[in-house]
Structure formats: C-alpha cells, structure tokens
Image (cartoon, rainbow, N blue to C red):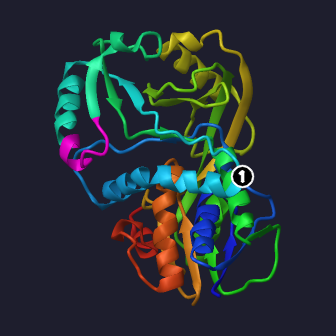
Amino acid sequence: MAEVTIYGAGIFGLSIGWACARRGAAVQIYDPNGVAAGSSGGPVGALAPHVPENWNAKKAFQFDSLIAAQDFWHGVEAASGLSSGYGRSGRLQPIADEKTLRLARAREISAQTLWQGKATWQVMPADTQANWAPQSPTGWLIHDTLSARIHPRNACLALAAALRAWGGRIEPTGPEHGVVVHATGWQGLRDLSEQFEQPVGNGVKGQAALLRYSAPDAPQLFADALHIVPHTDGTVAIGSTSERAFSNPGDTDTQLDAVIARATTAFPVLRDAPIIARWAGVRPRAKSRAPMLGAYPGRTGHFIANGGFKIGFGMAPKIAEVMADLILEGRDTIPDAFRVATCLNAGS
C-alpha cells in the first residue's frame, strides 16, 4: 500500500488526500490549525469559469475541473454523509455598455464550441430574471450555466469526513510516511520564497460577509467585481476584498463595509438582509498567478500543491487527480503553466 503524507488541511491538501485514498493509498494529513482553518474556511464559494475566448491550457484545465465537480462532490457527500453545499446553479452578470454587449454576444458564440455543449453562455434581457438580478445599465445580462457554488468550510469538513471513512487520518502533527505533499497555503509560499531566495508567491487578504437571505436555488451574481453567492442554508455570501498589504490577517474593517455597500447597490434586494457573519482570511497567490503544482525542487519524494488563490475550489477536482497521477503512478500531466519551475521562473 502506498503511503502519502500531506501538510495542510485546506482544499488542496484534502482533495489530493481524498483522490489518493480512493486509489488505495494510506493517507495522513497534518495541520496544527485543523481543517479549513485558513482561506479554505471562507463563506463565498464561487466556482466561476474564465470567459470563453483566447483559449489556453489553463482555461481548458479549469473547464475540465468545473465539469468534473458534480461527480467529485457527490462522491464526497456519499462517502461522508455531509453536504458540501455544491450546486451548479449558474451565474448572472450585468452588461454595462454597448461595447460589452457586443463582446458578450461574441463569447456566446465561442462558448458553443469551447464549452463542448456541456454548458452555455447566453445574453438575455434582465427583466426575465424577476427580482433576482443585478442592476444592468443596458437592460441585458450574461447567464452562464457552467458556474457553480459551494460552501467552502462545509465542503472541507465533508472531504475530511470522507477521507476518514476511507481510513485516512487528519492530525495536528505526526511522522512522515511515504511521499510528502506540501499544501500549506500562503505561509508555505512565504517559506518557499525564503528558501529559494526569490519571490515565489504571497498572501492576499480577502474579507467577506454572510447575510441572512434565502434564495437556495438562485444563480450566483457577479457585479462590480463582487461575487454574490446564495447558499442552500438560507444565507447569501458577499465577497471579497483583495489586499496585498495587511497587518491583521483575521480582522475585518471598513473595507468590508464598502464591499457590502457596493453589493447592495448592485443588488438592492439585499439591502434589508441582516449581516450574520463577517470573515477575513489570507489566500495563497503564486507569482505565476496559476496554481503551483509538481515536484519539490531538491527534495526527492516531496511535492508542492499551492497557490489556489481565488480559483482553488473550482480547480480542486482536477488538481486532485493530476497530483494523484503524479505521486502515486509517476504520470505527469500537469500543464506547463502550473509547474513549480514556471512559478520560479515567472517575472516579478
């Protein structure tokens, strides 16, 4: 039986552990702070695709992962008996002006090919969505059916329970056995930067809010650079800020107040919804702006999976599989844009 040790109980560490356990490996995950203690424990959970144009390996990888997500999360829920909050409920975006409208219509056509008939990108009148729509200056919206939502913390707890059901262990610390995966978030990127004496990545703080508003079957919204995500438990998440400079990783402040104000302006139906939680955390952003995956330079039998940033949950199903391919079977199918060497060679 292969043995796998993983440092980090966030979305990358847990999903890779789950993929390895399903292939028969003995998995132990170590995290002194517990499951989803970092940015993987946030409330937002917007699994949104790149736009269907200028196709490249990164967009294709993300598309494959979003398509695989339903089976991935249904498998986790079946094994754990817990809800991940996953649902491919789609997304609405306002169209600001005539130029953007023309571009959206062009993408509507390109999506027919690039998304292989598995999802649609459609321009539609805003009045067809009744009250659940962002303010749109043109009266038109983009509706895509590839976007999905998930409850990040619940999804991590479901993954942890599924892994334990398959014999995996999650502990604060312990001895290393077998191959080792470092999925240690923004602190891990900081440590790698020190080790390689160059900037490998950094942490970007995000603040988000959870409101009491029930719209469990509604699509998520993207307006004014904000994600508005309705969850199945009668809440709506709003996020987030992107703060490269910060002193208190877990504190919320007036920047979150501004986010909430922008969200309720774009989507007035939320103006009277009570705020039930405020959240802040630090997301790992690799220098290459893509997930950082592959062998750990200079450490035989060690691997890196980091840099999920804003797309970690959307990428997780596919990343789990390619990392399991690599560490258990020696098959390297990682896109060049995601390789550790690419991140180390990326410009500042």
Q: Is residue 321 above or below residue 85?
A: below
Residue 286 appearing in the image: no
Give the position of the C terminus as an image quadrant.
Answer: bottom left
Horizontal side, residue 94 vs residue 310: left or right: left
Q: Residue at x 75, y 38 (%)?
A: 251
Q: Residue at x 52, y 66 (%)?
A: 320
Q: Residue at x 64, y 36 (%)?
A: 207
Residue 12 location (% of width, % of height): 59, 61
Residue 14 location (% of width, % of height): 64, 62
The residue stretch that appears in magenta: 111-120
Quickly name the residue at label 1: 157
Q: Is residue 272 above or below residue 231?
A: above
Residue 119 location (% of width, % of height): 31, 41
Residue type (three-letter) at the residue carrying disc 1: Leu
Horizontal side, residue 212 vs residue 287: left or right: right
Q: Main secondary structure of the magenta part?
A: loop
- Asked if residue 266 is among those painted magenta in the image, a careful observer would answer no
**Label 1 secondary element:** helix
Residue 100 appearing in the image: yes
Q: Quadrant of residue 237?
A: top right
Residue 289 location (% of width, % of height): 44, 56
Name the one closer to the observer, 285 or 144.
144
